[in-house]
Image (cartoon, rainbow, N blue to C red):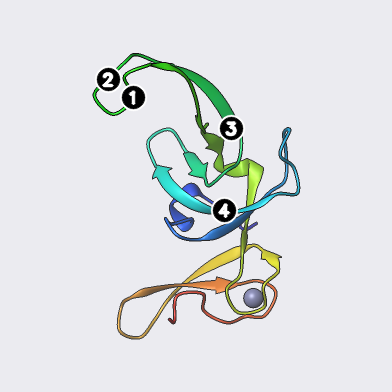
Amino acid sequence: MQKQDSTRIKKEDKVKIIAGKDRGKIGKVIRVDKKKNRLLVEKANMIKRHVKPSMKNPQGGIMEAEGPIHWSNVMIICSNCVKPARIRVKTLDSGEKARICSKCNETMDSK
Ligand SMILES: [Zn+2]
């Protein structure tokens, strides 16, 4: 059985959210927390945060920010076929690891 792990998702990847209140939404990964297996996706899972007054924001108040999403609640969108896909990791002859899309069998890192 193929196991998908959070390390296969990188910053700047496009992902589709498959669980929670933002199910179906597609966004760009803006941060990956490998220790907690969570990621932040642009404009997804927004949470309200209380902010103390600061130089930048002298009023303080409530700010919306992206909340962490567990990696198992997203699917990566392949940059080749633009479909939500599973990823296989293949070690190339050069020793480099490439992420392969399960749908189109193309590497997702050749850019
Ligand atoms: Zn693909």
Label 4, residues with CA under 10 Å away: few <14, some 14-19, many ≥20: some
Horizontally, residue 15 falls left or right of residue 50, namely: right
Tell me where residue 30 appears, x and y as whole percent: 44, 49
Q: CA distance from mark 3 to mark 2?
A: 22 Å
Instruction: Classify mark 4: helix, strand or loop.
Output: loop
Instruction: Classify mark 1: helix, strand or loop.
Output: loop
| Tag 3–tag 1 contact (CB < 8 Å) | no
Choose top left, top right, bottom left or bottom right for residue 111: bottom left
Of circles 3 and 1, the one toward us is: 1
Label 2, residues with CA under 10 Å away: few <14, some 14-19, many ≥20: few
Q: CA distance from mark 3 to mark 4?
A: 25 Å
Mark before the other along the chain sequence, 3 or 4: 4
Tell me where residue 63 appears, x and y as whole percent: 48, 25
Q: CA distance from mark 4 to mark 2?
A: 41 Å
Quadrant location of ligand 1? bottom right
Q: CA distance from mark 3 to mark 1?
A: 19 Å
Of circles 3 and 2, the one toward us is: 2
| Tag 3–tag 2 contact (CB < 8 Å) | no
Mark before the other along the chain sequence, 4 or 2: 4
Choose top left, top right, bottom left or bottom right for residue 34: top left
Q: What type is the residue that disc 1 sits on?
A: Asn
- Residue 57, disc: 1
Mark before the other along the chain sequence, 3 or 1: 3
Question: Which residue is tagged 2?
Answer: 54
**Nearer to the camera, 51 or 107:** 51
Question: Which residue is tagged 3?
Answer: 46
